[in-house]
Amino acid sequence: MIEFSNVTKSYTVGTHALRGITMQIEDGDFAFLVGPSGSGKSTIIKLITGELKPTSGTVHVNGYSLERIREREIPYLRRTVGVVFQDFRLIETKTVYENLAFAMRAIGAREQEIRDRVPYILNLVGLENKSRRHPTELSGGEQQRLAIARALVNNPSTIIADEPTGNLDPARSLEIMNLLQEINNLGTTMLVVTHERDLVERFGKRVIAINEGLVVHDGMDGYYRA
């Protein structure tokens, strides 16, 4: 579960990024996080992943208290949260299989675990026939699927997708959103940060709207302001 309680975040330059955020995302939820540039969305992501600590208030993520978390605990927190980036951030010198294996080795997975897990995840995202390709040999949609696979491979309970369709055409965007929906249906909590109005309206999920560091809407009624 992700829980923010009256969270503020100010930067040393004087910017008040968050001004009292309270929200809760339960295990298994699917929610869109929307809002204009500079509204505080990126700060929320950085708080969830332990990159930042709140100035005041409390943040709880999958059993960790982010205002009190110790440096040595942050890698364990991040194993519970997979992040999908808009710019993919794949290792171009490694194959599709090797990108996922590398992510697993980074947390100390055994080779047998890697041999079992990687094919399963590639099949889940529809890349089972691309394991020997390099990222540069994939289409944009396939690269995003690989980025999602990498976020999934260590079996996190939560996925944060930060503008996952920002570089894709409408057809590929819909494919990616359907994939994220399928992953959510398997029990993974999903938080999708997006400016894509059509996708938000089409999927009819919970929408958390942020503006000027405040939650201005949180509900299922299709609200969108960005």
Image (cartoon, rainbow, N blue to C red):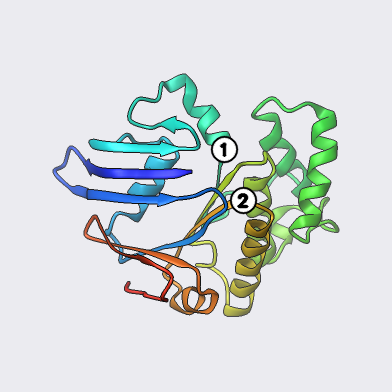
The crowding category of the residue bearing disc 1, from other C-alpha atoms within 10 Å (few below 14, some 14 to 19, many at least 20), is some
Give above or below for 174 relative to 85: below
Gap between marks 1 and 2 measured at Cα: 10 Å
Mark linked to residue 27: none
Chain-order first, disc 1 or disc 2: 1
Residue 15 place in picture, x, y as percent:
17, 47
Amino acid, disc 1: Thr
Q: How many marks?
A: 2
Residue 31 place in picture, x, y as percent:
48, 61
Q: Which residue is mark 1?
A: 80
Instruction: From the image, state whether disc 1 or disc 2 is nearer to you.
Output: 2
In front of the other: 115 or 48: 48
Q: Residue at x 21, y 40 (%)?
A: 11
Mark linked to residue 188: 2
User: The C terminus lies in which quarter of the figure?
Assistant: bottom left
Q: Residue at x 54, y 62 (%)?
A: 164
